[in-house]
Amino acid sequence: MSLADPARIDVRGTLECGDEVAIDVNCVFEGRVSLGPRVRIGPNCVLRNVTVGADTEVHAFSHLEDSQIGKRCRVGPYARLRPGTSLADEVHIGNFVEVKASRLGAGSKANHLSYIGDAELGERVNVGAGTITCNYDGAAKHRTVIEDDCFIGSDATLVAPVRIARGSYIGAGSTINKDTPAGQLTVARARQVSIPSWKPKKKKT
């Protein structure tokens, strides 16, 4: 194991490391943490009860808790994995992405600015920026299922319970509250309207 600065690491439980693990400064490890061979942990990360597979990189300022991470994954910077998260091999979780009680299949990606909660993602799913799963109706949590090879356009809202069938494409800006057919493009947007007679209100002087 290689430490960027042995004076700036905080282990508050058990830390197990494989060969050639590299840990940058100001990282906190709580509970039981296991890092596989050649894992790299960037600066200012917090890991609590986490298992990380070989050759995975966790970038700066990421917070991982009660999660399982596969091999050759990339997490962060500024990512949050909450309890019940499971990432298969070669999954990418990017900056300002939060994942909770969800499983992501091999090769799936959510690279920026998304919330994935109570969801099941298959393999090779691409989640566009600003996508959220609406998992809570005010009384109960519901699950979102996204099958293999789906493409979720930016700023999509998936209202659970809902199933996005294999090979679906979701148009950017869509709100999806019904199951989609496999292999088709689904778009759910209000029609764009311009009002030529509209004038902005003026402040009283």
Image (cartoon, rainbow, N blue to C red):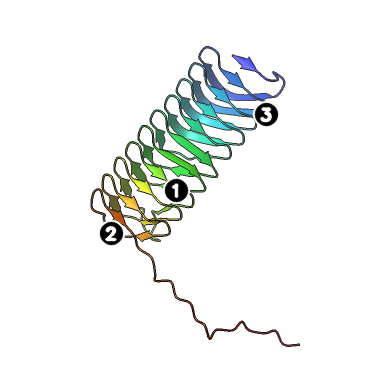
| Marked residue nearer the N-terminal end (2 or 3) | 3
Amino acid found under the numbered disc labelled 1: Gly
Look at 26% across and 52% down and name the residue there. 184
Disc ID at residue 178: 2
Secondary structure of the residue carrying tag 2 is loop
Secondary structure of the residue carrying tag 3 is loop
Amino acid found under the numbered disc labelled 3: Asn
165 and 28: which is toward the camera? 165
| Residue 30 seen in this snapshot | yes
Look at 41% across and 47% down and name the residue there. 117
Location of residue 74 with respect to 130 vertically, above or below: above
Secondary structure of the residue carrying tag 1 is loop
| Marked residue nearer the N-terminal end (2 or 1) | 1
Quadrant housing the C terminus = bottom right
Crowding around mark 2 (Cα neighbors within 10 Å: few <14, some 14 to 19, many 20+) is few
Q: Quadrant of residue 173?
A: bottom left
Task: Look at discs 3 and 1 and give the one toward the viewer.
Answer: 1
Location of residue 129 with respect to 52 vertically, above or below: below
| Residue 142 seen in this snapshot | no
| Marked residue nearer the N-terminal end (3 or 1) | 3
114 and 11: which is toward the camera? 114
Residue 167: x %, y % from top left: 28, 45
Residue 81: x %, y % from top left: 49, 38
Residue 145: x %, y % from top left: 31, 47
For this orientation, the residue located farthest to the front is 196
Amino acid found under the numbered disc labelled 2: Lys
